[in-house]
Image (cartoon, rainbow, N blue to C red):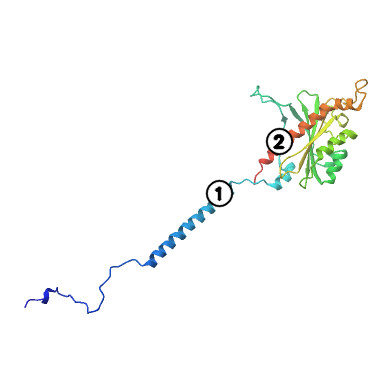
Amino acid sequence: MGYPPSGQAPGYRRPPPGYPPAQPLRRGAGRVVAGVLVAGFGLLSTLVGGGLIAQAISNANQEITNKEFVRNLWRNLPVETIFPATIGLRDPDHPGQSGDRGWTRAAVSSDTSCGEALTGGLAREARERGCQAAIRATYVDDTGGTAATVVIVAFGAPDADDDLDVILQDAQQEERDFGIRALPVSGARWRDNARAGSGGHSVWHPSATLFVAVTSGPADGRLAGRLPEPWGRSVTDQRADRSPWGETAKGMAKSTAAHLAAEIEKVRE
């Protein structure tokens, strides 16, 4: 009889009866579920992290007005910025462009008190509304015939400058109250008695509490609105004689307010 019996290989052991055959190795279902959960949490973390980064970038790109700086704009900006050396003069490099009336700064006051810069009804209203400061500069137009004193009035509370332009206008009609004290300049006869018209305009910006008031008149001291007869028979005639300076003051107040609003836009945190 040959070896091994029944042709079995050496070392082979037959499993005992009733033992189930071995099954091929498979991945457990729990392992698959765990993998899916891990992948899901990883994707969620990526999305949340990306959202936070995007929000941070968005916040970094936002520009917020520095309100405290704007409230004290009158002393935070250089005088050369608040009161430019020239206004409306044509650029010599662009002679073909249309230019506004040209003005040259002739004087700047170092006194910032509201009582020194303002007079009459405007002074009373400003005081009652909490005027903090009033800074002045005088300009002379490019013909040398007209002078204008510009006053920037700073308040502490929002909306304190509301309707001041109307109050200033009404005061001129009723009492010849021009509201702004003229700042004299050397070489001209620009004094309070030469004032012929005034105008005002608020600085339109949510963070601004500024009001611009301007008075203008003949730089040589001539008294406007005192026409002899027959040209000055009525009050209307006298007002008509002063009206050009009043319109000049209104336009200058509006342009100065726009200039300040543009400077505020440059102030960011």
Of residues 23 and 37, the one nearer the viewer is 23
Q: Position of residue 142 (x, y in %)?
A: 75, 24
**In the figure, is residue 26 to the left or right of 96?**
left
Residue that sits furthest to the front in the current view = 18
Name the disc covering residue 70, or none: none
Q: Which amino acid type corresponds to the residue marked 1 in the rendered image? A: Ile
Q: Is residue 47 above or below residue 131?
A: below
Q: Secondary structure at mark 1?
A: helix
**Nearest to N terminus: mark 2 or mark 1:** 1
Q: Position of residue 118 (x, y in %)?
A: 84, 38
Q: Is residue 47 above or below residue 184?
A: below
Q: Residue at x 80, y 26 (%)?
A: 146
Name the disc covering residue 259, or none: 2
Q: How many dots with numbers?
A: 2
Q: Secondary structure at mark 2?
A: helix
Q: Is residue 105 above or below residue 78?
A: above
From this viewpoint, is residue 74 visible?
yes
Q: Position of residue 86 (x, y in %)?
A: 72, 30
Name the residue tied to disc 1. 57
Of residues 7 and 223, the one nearer the viewer is 7
Q: Residues within 10 Å of mark 1 (few under 14, many from 20)?
A: few
- The answer to which image quadrant residue 125 occupies is top right
Residue that sits furthest to the left in the current view = 1
Q: Which amino acid type corresponds to the residue marked 2 in the rendered image? A: His
**In the figure, is residue 222 to the left or right of 80?**
right
From this viewpoint, is residue 180 visible?
no
